[in-house]
Amino acid sequence: MFSELKPLPTDPILGLMAAYKQDTNPNKIDLGVGVYKDEQGNTPVLRAVKKAEAFRLENETTKSYIGLAGNLDFCQKMETLLLGEHSTLLANRVRTAQAPGGTGALRVAAEFIKRCNTDATVWVTTPTWANHISLFEAAGLTVKEYPYYDYENKGLLFDEMIDTLKQVPKGDVVLLHACCHNPSGMDLNEEQWKIVAELAKEVGFTPLIDIAYQGFGASLDEDAKGLRLLADAVDELIICSSCSKNFGLYRERIGACSIIAKDSANADISNSVLLSVVRSIYSMPPAHGADIVNTILGSTELTQEWHDELDEMRNRINGLRTLIKDSLAAQGVAQDFSFIDKQNGMFSFLGINKEQIERLQKEYAIYIVGSSRVNVAGVSQANIEYFSKAVAEVLK
Ligand code: PMP
């Protein structure tokens, strides 16, 4: 049976990671992989996480299963983090299942959507995080795209997006990135979120919010503004959240899938379906990451420490955005890179071509994925001059 298999190409980002690792150039820069890096190029364990882990090691009393929905305290705290402590939805209309990372949450959501409507199409932004498409197709759903990023003007194709969303059939799902759009860094503003919320009610599609970078854009609350606006406006909503970036828990695989239903009774029914989906994929989620997040959010002191560390990460990213823009201008680059300073989160498209990307890799050991998406956090005070000189050179 296996001999019938044809080899599949490796994921371009994983290929890039491997090539970077082998490169012996001491000036090499990795702008490909999507993890936060500090000034030294490391992705350290957060201090608040270390303390919560020490507490867990001391106080854990069993390794027995934690149940289909995972750690219920964690689920409740995630609902509050996402919807805000004053949300009236918390009392009766939201149900959450802990999931193995944001990816696990999306996979659960995909199967849940399939159970709701076998013929549903999931509409995603052009472009989107590549795995979105594979995840929904793996559940047998059709995936279609709606216009989003304006490559030419480095902004949003908002009118075109709305024109397409107006045509979405009732019963379909529209995936929206809550903040820090991956790969473009372009987010909707509050006015635009309101228009999308009105449209969702009018057209009857179900929004699915992917929130993988809460706290990396402006603040925890600000980054959830669009999500909260939609949650208050519509009867039904799906939220897939991830603690990989904002808690730095990448490899612990911790996230959540939350369903907001029209009333408490329907929320219970939806929850029973959600849990049956979980049962048939991985039965029960792992415990470690949820315990860490629950311990941090359950302690005023650790929450403060986490907020401080999150502020540190966000301020570094935003500072680097300004630095990249200024440094490229200082090298006399003719193109306008001011858009980098206006976008959010770790990613932006540099907007350079394939040949220039190849030259950056071959001649300067600067690793960027083929779409020209860069992870801003891969730059540092130490390498910014080398980076901008190299970009200036390949743009000549
Ligand atoms: N959604 C988006 C938009 C992402 O960029 C990512 C991670 N790159 C995820 C979801 C999933 O994150 P994870 O599974 O690592 O929690």
Image (spheres, helix red, strand yellow):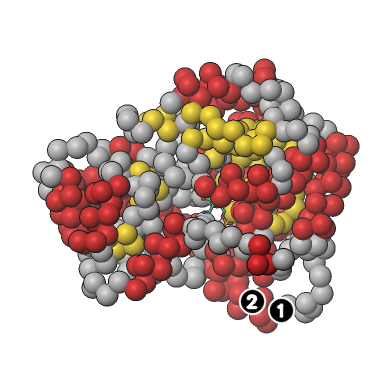
Q: Residue furthest left?
A: 332
Disc sitting over residue 59 in the figure: 1
Q: Is residue 328 left or right of residue 92?
A: left
**Figure quadrant of residue 311:** bottom left
Residue annotated with mark 2: 55
Q: Is residue 391 left or right of residue 142?
A: left
Does residue 91 lie above or below 306 as drawn? above
Disc sitting over residue 95 in the figure: none
Inter-mark Cα distance, 1 to 2: 6 Å
Does residue 191 lie above or below 243 as drawn? above
For the residue marked with disc 1, what is the amino acid? Answer: Asn
Q: Secondary structure at mark 2?
A: helix
Residue 315 screen position, x and y as percent = 37, 53
At horizontal 42% and vertical 33% (from top left) the residue drawn is 149
At horizontal 49% and vertical 60% (from top left) the residue drawn is 10
User: Which of 287 and 81 lies nearest the eye of the viewer?
Assistant: 287
The quadrant of the rendering that contains the N terminus is bottom right
Does residue 343 lie above or below 205 as drawn? below
Label 1 neighbour load within 10 Å: few <14, some 14-19, many 20+:
few
- Whether disc 1's CB lies below 8 Å from ligand 1 is answered no
Question: Tags 1 and 2 in contact by the CB under 8 Å rule?
Answer: yes
